[in-house]
Amino acid sequence: MRKTSYLCTRFICVLIFCTFSFMLQSQMLKSVVYDFDGFDVGQTNLPEGDYKYGDLSYQVSANPGTVSDMLGDRVLKLNLDWNAGYGAFGRGISRYIEFNTNQDIFNFFIYNPASNNQNAVIEVKIADDDDASNAYENANDDVWKKNVIVPGGAGWQLISIPLKDFTDANTGGNGIFDMAFTQNKGMILLVEFRFTKPAPTSPSAVFYIDMINFSDGILPRGSTEFDLPYKSPSDQCLLGAFEVEAPGQYQLIPQHFEALFSMPMKKLKYTNCFLQWANNGNTTPHAMPGPGLQTLINNGYTPILTWEPLFEGFAHLDPVQPKLQNIINGDYDSYIDNFADNIKLLSDTIIIRFMHEFDGDWYPWCVSQNGGDPNKYITAFRTVVDRFRSKGATKIKWMWCPNSDYAPYESYNWFVSAYPGDTYVDLVATDVYNNHYPSSLPWWRSFRWQTAESYYYLNKYFPGKPMFIAELGCRERAITEDPSSETKAAWFARMDKELQSNFRKVRGLVFFNAVASQNWFINTSSSSLASIKNNIWTDNYYFLTQSTTAIEENEYGGGLYVYPNPNTGIVTLSYNSSKPKESFSIVIYNATGKSVYSEILNKPADSFTRHVDVSVLPKGIYLVEMEATDSKNSGKSKIKEVRKLILQ
């Protein structure tokens, strides 16, 4: 594998995408089209909208090249017999994605074995739904194309195409690459790879593809395109758990969960517990938090109280259940006030996760169950928070938690549209399950695939809010499934890698250790439990320790990242801020204080990424200094951050 520099990215033939030299650029995985990890070898019926035509057939295959952190052990094998001279594979996506054509990039990995003795001649197609009919119609919708030629080689190659480089290939549609939830821009309908026979005498060919995705900026990576991006030393994701306990006995959750690992020095940080408004079979809200919350606080845990406007004993969507308008109208003000008074008695701050998974269709507070109006959800959320504050109940962090799957999948149901506002939300979160909805389908999704979009939107639109995965679960394989497929244990192992790379800004991971539609217990098999123990429970990344606290508070700030560190070749300097900066100054000093690298970036932005070749420098300790000046409208204040860099 060859290292990829920022100034010379490894692309091929007609696809030259290395104009990122000295550009300010974000890097974030945005949406996964297909990630074949977890699929069965030989599988031909893919779970979400696959199709083919012409000379092409396909099946899931073992990775014929080197398995890497970026590419797992499952890929898609494409067989071209060249009878008609063309063949295509695609996915009918029919999905809203908020694209920025000036910045977003379409990526995929392809392997063209040298034994094919031919180029892979590909027309990449993306179609959008300009007339909002949820079907591609040549007269009414745009189709965007980009031609790519991939020569034969010894291994995998990354192809990255900026969306702005796609050209409109038909007369239908509005001629604008404008897919989004908002402004009636419509869905992305399909992504297609159409292969053409390169020469009349070309023999049959076999190609492989994997990790088809969209990214905001260049695809995040480590030292090479096959390595996952690096975390910062200040990154950390603390653990929590939910278990079913008797009403009011929330304090038992930690001891039962922690006992699974027999490591007394390792403790959870968070406990999740559920409380409905009424739990006695009637429709008068009365349920109050019991003493278990104070016991948890006394024992050093932070309770997450998932507070549900539900009347237990009735179906979730029964008309007797509370609706958003009832909350807005003040029908439950007395109960809400009493609840706030009870919370005030606690000695320390708790987290209240209120009206979670509102982008689903299974709770009475869901946007879909309230006229499809996200403003009703916002108003109801704010109403409750305001009443708590008016009662003096301020030792609360309010958590806003959409689900990672939308139901129904409609433009009005984009969770970003239902955000109550920064002054009403302290923490943002999402719930992630492998094979959660709909539970009747046996599809299997990698953690990366399932998490990417919700993580992206939470991070992009609410960058100042700590992010949690408030519920996490994976099912075991069914006995009818291929025993060689990815196991629950392997899924957790891959999740660990992703949490410390693509999703390194997740600050809390809460296991849903219970049965609900599936068996989500972490110990459904000895291998599953061992995977969590070996990959997560023994890693201080998931635990609050004295050393990591010192690093986070003293040596490392929240903005400038220097990685990998220690380093032997290409060092990545990355900075992110919630406020725009007018300029950046970067200087690297050696141990004697001499500058060995310097650069000034005058293009206004809130972030930058630089890849610097330090392989020519002697081994030793260096300091990386970054000074940033705020934009003109924010007073031109300066900040300075310094990081230690070790060259080995």
Image (cartoon, rainbow, N blue to C red):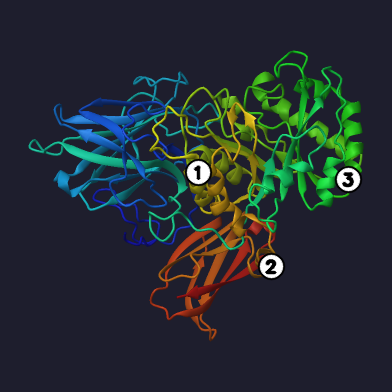
SS at mark 1 in the image: helix
The alpha-carbon separation of the residues under discs 1 and 3 comes to 38 Å
Q: Contact (CB < 8 A) between labels 2 and 1?
A: no
Q: Helix, strand, or loop for circle 3? A: loop
Residue linked to disc 1: 489
Asked where in the image residue 182 lies, by quadrant, the reply is: top right
Please tell me whether residue 447 is drawn above or below residue 580 in the rendered image. Answer: above
Please state if 240 lies on the left or on the right of 589 as rendered. right
- Tell me the mark number nearer the camera, choosing from 2 and 1: 1
Residue at 63% of width from left, 41% of height from top?
A: 511
Side of 215 where 157 appears, left or right = left
Q: Nearer the viewer, mark 1 or mark 3?
A: 1
The amino acid sitting under disc 2 is Ala
In this rendered view, identify the residue nearer to me: 211 or 14. 211
Please name the amino acid that badge 1 sits on: Ala
Residue 346 - label: 3
Between the residue at mark 2 and the residue at mark 1, the CA separation in whole angstroms equals: 33 Å
Looking at the picture, tell me which residue is in the foreground, 292 or 18. 292
Name the spot of residue 163 as percent of width and height, x first: 40, 41
Label 2 belongs to which residue?
550
Q: Amino acid at mark 3?
A: Leu
Res. 580 in view: no
Snapshot quadrant of residue 223: bottom left
Locate the C terminus and report the quarter of the image it occupies.
Answer: bottom left
Badge 3 crowding class, 10 Å Cα cut-off, few under 14, some 14 to 19, many 20 or more, is: some
Q: Position of residue 42 (x, y in %)?
A: 31, 33
Q: Nearer the viewer, residue 397 or 165?
A: 397
Q: Earlier in the sequence, mark 2 or mark 1?
A: 1
How packed is label 2: few (under 14 Cα within 10 Å), some, or many (20 or more)? Answer: few
